[in-house]
């Protein structure tokens, strides 16, 4: 079967103020169609860099990335990408922000409005269609970005710390919502998080990156019974085992970063 995302020998260095920084080194990873994969790793290990390369925003200079069998070369319009700095436009209302990608995909006005309403309800923002982003809290803005991402149903979702700014309770609700959508539609999902519990709850495989230069250190296959109960799942022994293995892989990377 063709991988949804096939990453081969990817390496990336940045030159900043005359100094070369190797951000990613020798990254190889195949992600299957419909698979939910999480990336975890210390800050600065290249997770966003890799997401930007899959999305085609950052040129791939060494190695290659195929998406649905085709080399990524320029902006990849076949992925929905929620970047780490959300791209909600402050001068547009909530509904216009959510409708923007639907317009790009040629959806007619009435269908568009119906979809926007549906998405607002899904993220708990019914009644805020006419608000401007500046009138919302940080967590509400994040939810607008999530509604915008999910509205046009891309087959592949790239999400870079989408729930990082949410309070703990809302985060659980959004995880449940995302799992529900993924269970119905089976998109390929790449999800970056610093929250190991979130990674274990959502992902089928968790990829642990080393500190810079980012290399794949370990891949954990999470085997939990299928459930949408994102709260109770953490009391299962399988959850604890996966969490512990991930922590053991990640903790030394974080500690060595602090020492450096
Ligand atoms: N535009 C840039 N110019 C120069 N260096 C950069 C640039 N973008 C990223 N870097 C460097 O590349 C490394 C990887 O950055 P990246 O943003 O991919 O990390 P990350 O894993 O997403 O971190 P975080 O968890 O903090 O979001 C960092 O050390 C950073 O300093
Ligand atoms: Mg990042």
Image (tube, rainbow, N blue to C red):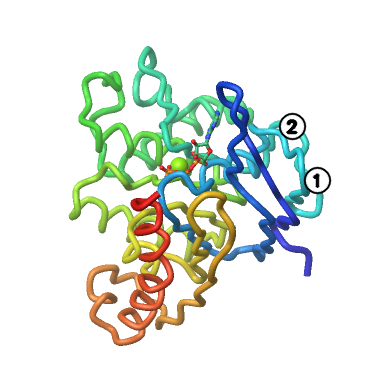
Image label count: 2
| 47 relative to 251 in the view: left or right | right
What residue do we see at 48% from left, 28% from top?
Answer: 110
* Image: 189 above or below 230: above
In this rendered view, identify the residue nearer to me: 166 or 255: 255
Give the structural element (helix, strand or loop) at label 1.
strand
Please give left or right for residue 126 compared with residue 65 in the image.
left
Q: Which residue is mark 2?
A: 74
The residue at the far front in this view is 260
Are dots 1 and 2 in contact, CB under 8 Å?
no
**Residue 140 point in image, percent of width and height:** 26, 35
Distance (Cα) linking label 1 and label 2: 9 Å
- Residue at point 74% right, 55% down? 9
- In the figure, 113 relative to 227: above or below? above
Query: Regarding mark 2 in the picture, which secondary structure is present there?
Result: loop
Q: Residue at x 33, y 58 (%)?
A: 195
Residue 199 percent across, percent down from the top left: 40, 63
In the rendered image, which quarter contains the N terminus?
bottom right
Q: Provide the residue designation for mark 1.
A: 71
Foreground residue, 42 or 256? 256
The image position of residue 258, as x and y in percent, is 34, 51
């Amino acid at each position: 079967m063709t991988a949804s995302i096939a990453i081969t020998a990817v390496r990336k260095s940045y030159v900043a103020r005359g100094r070369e920084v190797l951000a990613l080194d020798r990254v190889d990873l195949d992600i299957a169609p419909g698979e939910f994969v999480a990336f975890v790793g210390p800050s600065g290990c290249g997770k966003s860099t890799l997401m930007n390369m899959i999305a085609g925003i950052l040129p791939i200079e060494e190695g290659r990335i195929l998406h649905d069998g085709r080399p990524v070369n320029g902006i990849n319009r076949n992925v929905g990408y929620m970047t780490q700095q959300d791209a909600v436009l402050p001068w547009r209302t909530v509904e216009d922000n959510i409708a923007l990608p639907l317009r790009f995909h040629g959806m007619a006005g009435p269908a568009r409005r119906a979809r926007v309403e549906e998405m607002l309800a899904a993220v708990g923002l019914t009644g805020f269609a006419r608000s401007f982003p500046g009138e919302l809290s940080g967590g509400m803005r994040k939810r607008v970005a999530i509604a915008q991402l999910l509205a046009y149903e891309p087959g592949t979702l790239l999400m870079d710390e989408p729930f990082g700014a949410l309070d703990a309770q809302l985060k659980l609700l959004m995880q449940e919502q995302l799992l529900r959508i993924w269970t119905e539609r089976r998109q390929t999902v790449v999800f970056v998080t610093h929250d190991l519990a979130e990674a274990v709850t959502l992902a089928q495989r968790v990829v642990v990156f080393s500190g810079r230069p980012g290399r794949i250190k370990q891949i954990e296959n999470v085997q939990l019974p299928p459930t949408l109960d994102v709260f109770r799942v953490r009391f299962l022994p399988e959850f604890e085992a996966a969490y512990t293995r991930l922590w053991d892989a990640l903790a030394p990377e974080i500690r060595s970063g602090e020492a450096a």
